[in-house]
Image (tube, rainbow, N blue to C red):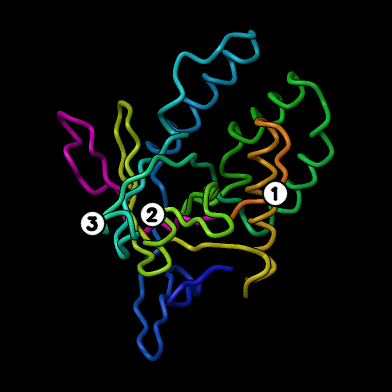
């Protein structure tokens, strides 16, 4: 069961975090073209390697977001600030999530070549399928009595900062929404949960259980690339 101490409501261009009678609004901003071109371009390079039966030369870049959170101290720690590397993907549009789910369900038993082609289509057509105001991940290790530090922080404080280590280097900030279908979630959020688990198993193989999904809503984007044009300049 998710134990969050607040409620998150998505509005038109903003996210509300509701704690009792207190409401805090966070703007939703869109990932700029430079981020999308870098992120999808690097993923397509990896798929090209897989198509040629080569092991990818790197696994960082757009897939591995380093997520900083703060809020709760776990019993084995004395500091509440935490940083964890999360596998990060894209957030489906509301009108496209059913189509994405059906495509993967209909092809999940196909061979590697077919699956690579499906993912190639997803990434080549980013703006057809995906939103620019959010990213998506899974909370893989919170299960049963075990709680990760990221999870403990997010149930207390939904704010996060995420950095992608690559050249160029980007940072996104905003609020995170933990999703499990047994909780009070919308139909869209249930579908996002299903999509997040499907895309994870689509390439990594079957898992015996589903994982909590995390929507990382985006309120700020920064170019942290060293040198001209970067160094922490806000671009979204």
Q: Residue furthest front?
A: 76
Q: Quadrant of residue 174 in the image?
A: bottom left
* Residue located 61% across and 36% down the image: 125
What's the distance in space between the residues labelled 2 and 1, CA to CA? 21 Å
* Residue located 38% across and 91% down the image: 21
Which residue position holds label 2? 149
Q: Which callout, 3 or 2, points at the residue further toward the start of the chain?
A: 3
What's the distance in space between the residues labelled 1 and 3, CA to CA? 31 Å
Q: Few, some or many C-alpha atoms within 10 Å of disc 1 (few <14, some 14-19, many ≥20)?
A: few
Q: Secondary structure at mark 2?
A: helix
* In the displayed structure image, the side of residue 161 where residue 98 appears, left or right: right
Say if 159 sits above or below 91 in the image. below
Q: Which residues are magenta?
A: 214-235
* Residue located 30% across and 44% down the image: 171
Q: Is residue 222 magenta?
A: yes
Q: Is residue 197 magenta?
A: no
Give how far across and how far down residue 120 sits, in percent.
Answer: 64, 27
Which residue position holds label 1? 209
* Residue located 40% across and 29% down the image: 61
Which residue position holds label 3? 79
Give how far across and how far down residue 160 sits, in percent.
Answer: 34, 56
Q: Few, some or many C-alpha atoms within 10 Å of disc 3 (few <14, some 14-19, many ≥20)?
A: few
Q: Few, some or many C-alpha atoms within 10 Å of disc 2 (few <14, some 14-19, many ≥20)?
A: many
Give how far across and how far down residue 218 sits, in percent.
Answer: 40, 56
């Amino acid at each position: 069961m998710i134990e969050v101490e607040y409620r998150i409501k998505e509005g038109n261009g903003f996210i509300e975090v509701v704690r009792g009678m207190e409401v805090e609004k966070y703007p939703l901003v869109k990932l700029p073209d430079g981020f999308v071109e870098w992120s999808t371009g690097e993923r397509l390079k990896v798929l090209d390697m897989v198509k040629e039966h080569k092991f990818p030369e790197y696994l960082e870049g757009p897939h591995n977001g380093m997520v900083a959170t703060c809020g709760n101290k776990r019993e084995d720690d004395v500091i509440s600030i935490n940083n964890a590397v999360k596998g990060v993907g894209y957030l489906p549009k509301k009108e496209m999530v059913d189509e994405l789910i059906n495509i993967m369900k209909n092809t999940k038993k196909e061979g590697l070549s077919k699956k690579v082609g499906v993912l190639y289509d997803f990434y080549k057509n980013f703006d057809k399928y995906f939103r620019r105001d959010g990213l998506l991940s899974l909370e893989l290790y919170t299960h049963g009595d075990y709680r990760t530090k990221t999870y403990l922080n997010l149930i207390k404080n939904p704010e996060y900062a995420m950095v992608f280590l690559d050249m160029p280097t980007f940072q996104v900030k905003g609020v995170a929404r933990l999703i499990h279908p047994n909780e009070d979630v919308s139909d869209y959020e249930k579908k996002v949960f299903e999509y997040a688990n499907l895309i994870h198993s689509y390439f990594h193989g079957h898992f015996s259980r589903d994982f909590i999904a995390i929507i990382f809503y985006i309120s700020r984007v920064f170019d942290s690339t060293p040198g001209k044009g970067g160094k922490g300049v806000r671009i979204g």
